[in-house]
Amino acid sequence: MSQHAYMSRREDGVSAPGYVLEWSAKDSRAQRHRRILPSVEELRAELLAGEGGRTQGRILVLRAGRVDGAVREALVSVARVDGGFIDAHAAGTPYRPRGGRRTWWWTCTYPEVAAGEGQVPLYRPGDGQALTISRMSVWLGGGGVPVVIVGHGAGPERRGRDYKLRREYGGAGYGAIGSAPPGSIGRVEMSSFEQDLWEALEPPDEVAVEEVLGELVLDRWTGCLAAMRPGTIGSGAGHLQERESLWAAMAALESNLDEARRLSGRGGRQLGAARASAWEDLLRRLEMRVRLGQQGIGAEASPARGGKTDNDRSLDRIAYLGGLMLPVSAVASILAIGGDYGPGGESFWVFWLSSFLASVLAVLVIYADQLRTVEVWLETGELDGELLPWEGEGSEEHLVQRWADGSRRAAWERRELGWGGAVKKMSGYYWWRRDPRLAFRRPRGVKLGGL
């Protein structure tokens, strides 16, 4: 297959409605063929041909951007596809069947390379690639050829001449992320969904089509989540875009979980490994990643809150300078700088002594005002084991320490030092008493929110 073989284009360069994938078992190997459907008439003929037998498999792949009114009418009239099913895929909304028709259908979301514009990228694996969330709808009702609609309804994907579908350094599994050896210039890319589908086709008597599609989507999500790490969204994207990407991935996985539960509840055909338990496992992994990311952001922000910035230090210098100069003006205005208290007078020393004492007092008040906001840890007593808070519950102001020998548990409450504590700190009271129930640094063994 050439690198342009998946673009579904006719010889005149006009995009075709879709193509047919055919495969058969020969000498224990799958022989695969692909035929482009250049017109709606050939699409009708293919739909009338019906489904392949036990020795030959056939599926019809359509791009959502090329499903126009004529293609829709052919699917509805010939293949008995519900028009609401096609419209729901184009609009990206859930499909709600009407009437009592017993049909088998399935919709899911999957990570795709450069799928449309204006969407939130999941991450950028490199070389200009961007993975976004795309949509696939499968219709197996009516006993005809299975119909697979891929992509969004916003138009066909545009790929340049240098676009590569194959990974330069292959990985295991469908949708695996390629990795370049150290020192090489190889690119890290993810293959497209349609190429993975082509490579995943198995003899029809061994694996059903729906199982191949289900496992293919599951493996693509597994590879995508394995490659999504902090900072993989792209340089300059920031935490906001990364958070939007994680939430978009979580919503897509929840949608796939709902579909798997719906199919499991109805019985009949299943999706191989893409069961509800598999989607629940991926959701738990993604939720854990989001939780760890939030803790990392909090850890990065904590030193900024605890330490002083350059602006704070500049304000401190201005405050101390004002504390030194303001008392001089106040004392001068009180003594009126005249008579015995003025320059050359017998009591001029009173001015200097009063100014010095007032300046010292002002500086001490400023220093105490800074100390009163210092965070300290105060031991509040032993705790009953049944009253210990669960991790993540309660206020972060309460901390718990378990002693190394397990003899007792002590509760520590984080609070500000206050004016009284600031005066005691300045006077050396805490150094003199060495109170073990008060700590100016976080006690060892103490964890936020519980044990």
Image (spheres, rainbow, N blue to C red):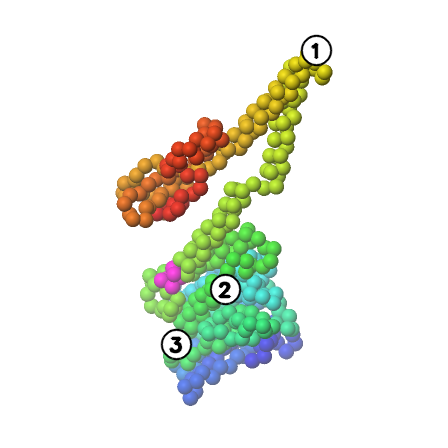
Check disc 1: other Cα within 10 Å, few if <14, some if 14-19, many if 20+. few
Q: Is residue 249 left or right of residue 271?
A: right
Q: Could you say which disc has been placed on residue 227 in the image? A: 2
Vertical relation: 441 (above or below) 55: above
The residue at 41%/61% (across/down) is: 282
Say whether residue 278 is magenta. yes
Residue, far front: 346
Of labels 2 and 3, the one closer to you: 2
Q: Is residue 272 left or right of residue 371?
A: left
Of labels 1 and 2, the one closer to you: 1
Q: Is residue 382 left or right of residue 185?
A: left
* Residue range (magenta): 276-281
Answer with mark 3 or mark 1, whichever residue precedes in sequence. Answer: 3
Q: Amino acid at mark 1?
A: Gly
**Residue 215, quarter of picture:** bottom left
Q: Could you say which disc has been placed on residue 207 in the image? A: 3
Report the front residue among 427 and 66: 427
The residue at 49%/74% (across/down) is: 171
Say whether residue 377 is magenta. no
Residue 351 image offset from top left, x and y in percent: 65, 18
The residue at 43%/82% (across/down) is: 56
Give SS at disc 1.
Answer: helix
Q: Amino acid at mark 3?
A: Val
Check disc 3: other Cα within 10 Å, few if <14, some if 14-19, many if 20+. few
**Dominant SS type (magenta):** helix
Structural distance between the alpha carbons of marks 2 and 3: 28 Å
Answer with mark 2 or mark 3, whichever residue precedes in sequence. Answer: 3
**Image marks 2 and 3: residues in contact by CB distance under 8 Å:** no
Vertical relation: 82 (above or below) 440: below
Q: Could you say which disc has been placed on residue 339 in the image? A: 1
Answer with mark 1 or mark 2, whichever residue precedes in sequence. Answer: 2
